[in-house]
Amino acid sequence: MPRKRFDLTFPPRQATKAITYHLVKDFDLVPNILRAAIQPGQEGRMLLELTGRKEDFEAGIAFLEAEGITVSPAASDIRLDEETCVLCGLCTAVCKPHALELAFEEGVLHFDKDKCVYCEACVIACPRRAITLSF
Ligand code: SF4
Ligand code: SF4
């Protein structure tokens, strides 16, 4: 079943609405909130992963937009400063979904965006501050 990630921006009046409930119940989509910064009365942000059928995606996103929520393809990203990285592998040890893999002989740290759940464990673990997370 297709899986997609979206950045959602909520206007202040919508920040507390139970949108995931409606996505499940009314549109047969499976939501997974990867990151959220939502406070009542303030503009909110959410990185949301949805799993479902193509036609359900379209209907679910139309519902969100009708609710005043801005929906765009996910731009959240992990950035690696290759100049700063010393290929120590500490970040790969804490990355539970195996989104980071060290190819030591190639001198490369590979990042698989589709596996990343934006937990920030690698950001915290890196002694060189070589990884940053944008949201
Ligand atoms: S944010 Fe979490 S899941 Fe993503 S690469 Fe870092 S440790 Fe892995
Ligand atoms: S923990 Fe930091 S320095 Fe070590 S491999 Fe990961 S990004 Fe590179």
Image (spheres, rainbow, N blue to C red):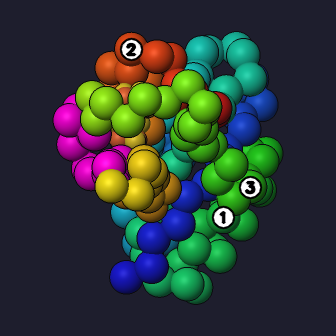
Label 2 lies in ligand 2 vicinity (Cβ under 8 Å): yes
Identify the mark nearer the N-term, 2 or 3. Answer: 3
Q: Amino acid at mark 2?
A: Pro
Q: Residue at x 39, y 21 (%)?
A: 126
Mark number for residue 93? none
* Quarter of the image where the N terminus is located: bottom left
Residue 84 shows in this picture: yes
Neighbor class of circle 1 (other Cα within 10 Å; few <14, some 14-19, many 20+) is: some
Q: Which residue is mark 2?
A: 127
Q: Which residue is mark 1?
A: 61
What is the count of numbered marks? Answer: 3
- What percent of the width, then of the height, locates residue 9? 72, 38
Q: Is residue 28 magenta?
A: no
Give the side of residue 68 with respect to residue 74, left or right. Answer: right
In which quadrant of the rendered view does residue 42 lie?
Answer: top right
Q: Which residues are magenta?
A: 91-104
Give the side of residue 39 with respect to residue 65, left or right. Answer: left
SS under mark 1? helix
Q: Is residue 100 above or below residue 120?
A: below
SS under mark 2? loop
Give the side of residue 118 with respect to residue 97, left or right. Answer: right
Q: Is residue 66 above or below residue 91?
A: below
- What percent of the width, then of the height, locates residue 128? 46, 16
Q: Residue at x 31, y 30 (%)?
A: 88
Q: Amino acid at mark 3?
A: Ser
Spatial separation of the CA atoms under disc 2 and disc 3: 33 Å
Q: Residue at x 38, y 35 (%)?
A: 87
Q: Amino acid at mark 1?
A: Ile
- Foreground mark, 2 or 1, reads 2
- Foreground mark, 2 or 3, reads 2
* Quarter of the image where the C terminus is located: top right
Q: Which residue is mark 3?
A: 72
